[in-house]
Amino acid sequence: MGKDGLVKFISVLGLIVFITFLSFAPVYGEEVITLEEALRLGLENNIAIKEGEAERRKAEIDLDTARRAFLPDISLSTSYTRLFLDEKRGAGSGGLLNPSDLQYPADPNAYANDFMLLNYMNYSLGSIMKGLEALQPDEDNYQTAISIQQPLYLGGKLKMAYQQAEKGLELTELQQRQKKNELLFNIIQSYYNILLAEERVRIEEDALELIREHKRIAEVSYQAGLSLKTDLLQVEIEENKAILSLASARNDLAMARKVFTNLIGVETEDKTFQAPGLALKPVLDKDQALSLAREKRVEFKLLELNQEVLELSDKMEASAYLPNIVLVGNYQWQGNEFSLDDGNGSISLALSMNIYDKGFSSNSRKKIAEDLNKLALTKENLEELLAIEVENLLLRIEENKYNIELQKMNLQRAEESLALEEKRYQAGTGTNMEVLNAWMVLKTTKIASIQADYQYELSLYQLLEKTGVLVDYCEEVIYNEK
């Protein structure tokens, strides 16, 4: 191969590589977000889910607090006091001078009688003052006390409080599952709304392009005197309608993306969406679907949990008249140095019992009994509503499935009608507006056909939600994807 041939070969090879890069550049530049990825992001980033996790952690703290209530209460108190004593005055002397500090007159004959009396009183009180000095406290004084309280029997209140804390944790977990169930279906619905909005934008863009082409033909025909101006004006009216319809479709797409972003907590402006390929196999038998819903629906589990909580509350009220027995231990010490030796201790067994509470506990139990009756009615009503809801959803699934077949036939007929109108127009027996009208029918039918497919798939997801297994299905899909 000559030099020119080598240069030509390298040039051709470089051109092929460049064209290949250009053809795949949009693919590399746009990140595809699948439905599985969207579900995972929603569970990780959604604010409502994070709030539910915080509530669960609080319930775990409450459970730990209820467990610690079985442990003893131990308290320690200590104090230090510093006394500043007058060395010249005896303790408890009320400010009297020490007898040794009295001043005698220089002349022993002066005030002889008074002095003798004072001297007598001084020496008589001397022994008393010395005794008071002996009772004078130390300058450093420490006081320490330790107290321990251990409940031995509280009528089962501690155990029932712990059980209620367990039910509280279970309640937060059920509420979190319910939030996940609603969130996942909203994400799925929002994802399909974006797909439908994107399809509508593409169809509206094609429609506007076709109308503008017909407008160009109408302008040429009018300028050539082959058609009336009314034909051109009608096309321009249709063009304005198409522009408005396209703007509306783009706005709907933008809003659908914003709603989706809020649900999953991730920006989606630079992401593309693709139709899900998930294998949906919901239970389509009415009796099986109802049985599954009774087993899995959070609402039924919440009713059962509320019943258990009310029964615990009733036991708590019934234990109001049972005795409370508490063991109390105390140890006290006092001295001029900090120490715990040679103190005084005591152990007490305290018993208290509610003899008469004016009927408050009895009234509370009556109210709990009414709440239990109301709960039974609520469960019965929920059963009836569930049966109606599931039956209606199964009918809609069949309706949506039938609608898919109808829309396929309508799409074929709309395409055939457009082809016939174009042939008539080319043969000179049809008008420009008749072609446009046929295209508008085709556009509407395309949107309806896509919508029918998406509605059918959404109704299957909704059945998973109503039977309470959507969370399990989605988590399994996310796990398998990883």
Image (spheres, rainbow, N blue to C red):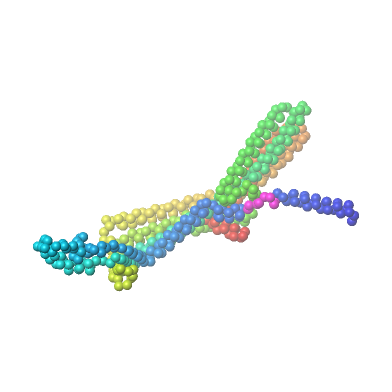
Q: Give the residue at the far bottom of this rendering.
A: 342
Q: In x, y percent, where is residue 322?
A: 30, 64
Q: Nearer the viewer, residue 361 or 341?
A: 341
Looking at the image, residue 2 sits to the left or right of residue 307; the answer is right
Specify whether residue 410 is in view: no
Q: Nearer the viewer, residue 440 or 270?
A: 270
Residue at position x 18%, y 62% from top? Answer: 103
Residue at position x 34%, y 54% from top? Answer: 367
Specify whether residue 476 is in view: yes
Q: Which residues are magenta?
A: 27-34
Q: Quadrant of the N terminus?
A: bottom right
Q: Nearer the viewer, residue 93 or 466?
A: 93
Looking at the image, residue 223 sits to the left or right of residue 456; the answer is right
Q: Is residue 236 above or below residue 187?
A: above
Q: Give the residue at the far left of this rendering.
A: 113
Residue at position x 61%, y 53% from top? Answer: 35
Q: Is residue 38 above or below residue 112?
A: above
Looking at the image, residue 80 sits to the left or right of residue 301; the answer is left
Q: Nearer the viewer, residue 1 or 161?
A: 1
Q: In x, y percent, where is residue 249?
A: 62, 41
Q: In x, y percent, where is residue 51?
A: 49, 53
Q: How many marks?
A: 0
Residue at position x 71%, y 41% from top? Answer: 416
Q: Is residue 455 above or below residue 104?
A: above
Based on the picture, tell me whether residue 223 belongs to the magenta stretch: no
Q: In x, y percent, where is residue 310?
A: 39, 57
**Res 337 → quadrant:** bottom left
Q: Quadrant of the C terminus?
A: bottom right
